[in-house]
Image (cartoon, helix red, strand yellow):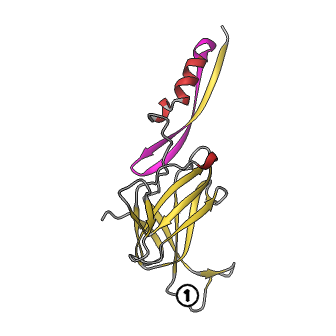
Amino acid sequence: MLKKTLTRRINIDIEGYCYTKKVSMLFPFRYVVPIIGLLSLGGIYGQEDDKILTPIVDLSARIKQHRFGASGQLVDGEEEMRKIIIQWNPIPGAISYDVCHNCRVLEDSTGPQPDEGGTGGGGLYLVNIDMTRDGRPAFVKSNTSLGKNTFHVRANLDGGKTTAWSQERIFNVNEPGNAVHEEL
């Protein structure tokens, strides 16, 4: 009997952390076509109606001081400034990502918009697909305001399509180290 190995990557969200797992299954060839059809409908991802995966921003972020080059010396005049590094799960087919920093979420379909009168320092940033840290998409926001900072992420796909915006992540930027997502 002719057999075919079917390999597929699946994303698993466990308590806000996204893991990618490569799954291989050996099937008799006559079952491969129906299974491929099921996978293409999103069955293995638990999706309906051709919805696309949404980025899941990690529950922790890295806070660092502004340092200069290989020497690691603090930049003069920027001792009180911080940068934050956030990461999220990669989205299959993404050509880039949008990160909205300090956005307010609108109730209509437009999603997060920069909060121009709110927490300050907000904006919409384009993150190229090659901006990664340990093989996962990452965004570094320099000169981040101290205090609570919010982030949303969405993936840009071919044909001008985008995923839905991620859930909001709130990080309290203070001392260098790790910051953990805080609920409002």
Q: Which residue is drawn at 62% across and 44% down?
A: 93
Is the magenta region chiefly helix, strand or loop?
strand
Residue 106 screen position, x and y as percent:
38, 60
Name the quadrant containing residue 7: top right
- Foreground residue, 178 or 110? 110
Residue 30 screen position, x and y as percent:
61, 12
In the picture, measured across the screen, residue 135 lies left or right of residue 153, that is right
Residue 165 screen position, x and y as percent:
46, 54
What span is in magenta?
A: 10-31
Residue position marked by numbered label 1 in the rendering: 78
The question of residue 43 being in magenta is answered with no
Residue type highlighted by circle 1: Glu
Q: In the displayed image of the protein, which residue is found farthest to the top?
A: 1
Q: In the displayed image of the protein, which residue is found farthest to the left?
A: 184
Badge 1 marks a residue whose secondary structure is loop
- Foreground residue, 44 or 14? 44
In the picture, measured across the screen, residue 179 lies left or right of residue 140, that is left
Residue 7's place in the image compared with 132, above or below, is above
Residue 142's place in the image compared with 156, above or below, is below
Residue 86 screen position, x and y as percent:
51, 63
Quadrant where the N terminus is found in the figure: top right
Q: Residues within 10 Å of mark 1 (few under 14, many from 20)?
A: few
Q: Which residue is drawn at 49% across and 64% down?
A: 100
Q: In the displayed image of the protein, which residue is found farthest to the bottom?
A: 77
Q: In the displayed image of the protein, which residue is found farthest to the right?
A: 70
